[in-house]
Image: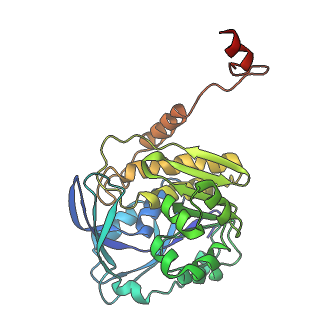
Amino acid sequence: MARGSLLVVGTVAYDSVRTPAGRRESALGGSGAYFSVAGSYFTGVSLVGVVGEDFAPSDMDILRSRGVELSGLETKPGRTFRWSGVYGAEDVKTRDTLDTQLNVFEDFAPSLSDAHRASGYLFLANMEPSLQLDALTQMSPRPRLVSLDSMNFWIDGSGDALRRIVENVDVVFMDEGEARSFTGQVNLSAAAKAVMGTGPSSVVVKRGEHGALLFHGDGVFSAPAFPTERVVDPTGAGDCFAGGFMGYLAATGDLSEAGFRRAAVVGSVMGSFAVESFSLDRVGSLERGEIEGRFRALTEMAAFAPLGEGESLPWRGRQDWREE
């Protein structure tokens, strides 16, 4: 497997979701599935995970149709990971989990093939931190770029284990609440700097409809969110953001600050498609022009004229106050 290839270790699940736009039962989901499909538009993606005997061949075909490499997706006796939740009627950012059934994922231990171990880019999707560390320690040589996602459940219940894996990765994806909870810092800039102080060179703070903040080295970049007119289901949007982000970097190999900023915008684009449907319906059937169109639109949204050489902003000094 080429060193430019992208490996994700994560969940493949069946989600039952209710939102203000409707509901869907037993729909294909999971962090690994969302990430793989979003990243597959830019580079080859290999998925390591586990499903049960109830996993439908048609859902396997959805992943194959995007060229996702599935030799690491095990099928074991039992039922596939299942999750159900409901989103708030007034604020789709609020979500209540109704039921979580780990099923075959309860005994999951990532076992990477020689080809997977040689992947140049690794994403450790949201799961128990010890599993993330297990996967990372199997990589040989260490990938060019390692990133991870997490959630408050692990921050609150497995904080020490999470800190151990965070210290060993390059990029951390968290939402605003997770960044504050993990660091104890209310200010997002302070929270990101606290995470980076433990080892990572970059932190991406996901802010939903407000876009994302990328803290990379000494710089800060604000990636805008595409203004979608109708949010159907936010499930998986963060994983699609990460898939676009890592997919772009793996495809280009550009790990400069400019490359990271472009990757953040690509991530924002992929997240915007994810919320427009249940499951992978929308993000799994995109055309190149749709993705590039939104990328260009976000570029235009964030563009403004900088100060030219010798130019300054208008300034009203104290002497002007006195003379008025």
Q: On screen, 149 above or below 88?
A: below
Residue extending farthest top: 323
Q: Quadrant of residue 26?
A: bottom left
Q: On screen, 137 above or below 13?
A: below
x, y percent for residue 318 = 72, 20
Q: Quadrant of residue 27?
A: bottom left
For residue 254, say whether it is visible: yes
x, y percent for residue 107 = 43, 90
Q: On screen, 124 above or below 248?
A: below
Q: 320 or 219, which lies in front?
A: 320
Q: On screen, 50 above or below 149?
A: below
Residue extending farthest right: 310
Residue ID at (49%, 62%): 177
x, y percent for residue 79 = 29, 84
Residue ID at (31%, 74%): 83
In the rendered structure, the answer to whether residue 214 lies left or right of residue 301 reads right
Q: Classify the position of the C terminus by image quarter.
A: top right
For residue 123, say whether it is visible: no
In the rendered structure, the answer to whether residue 231 lies left or right of residue 251 reads left
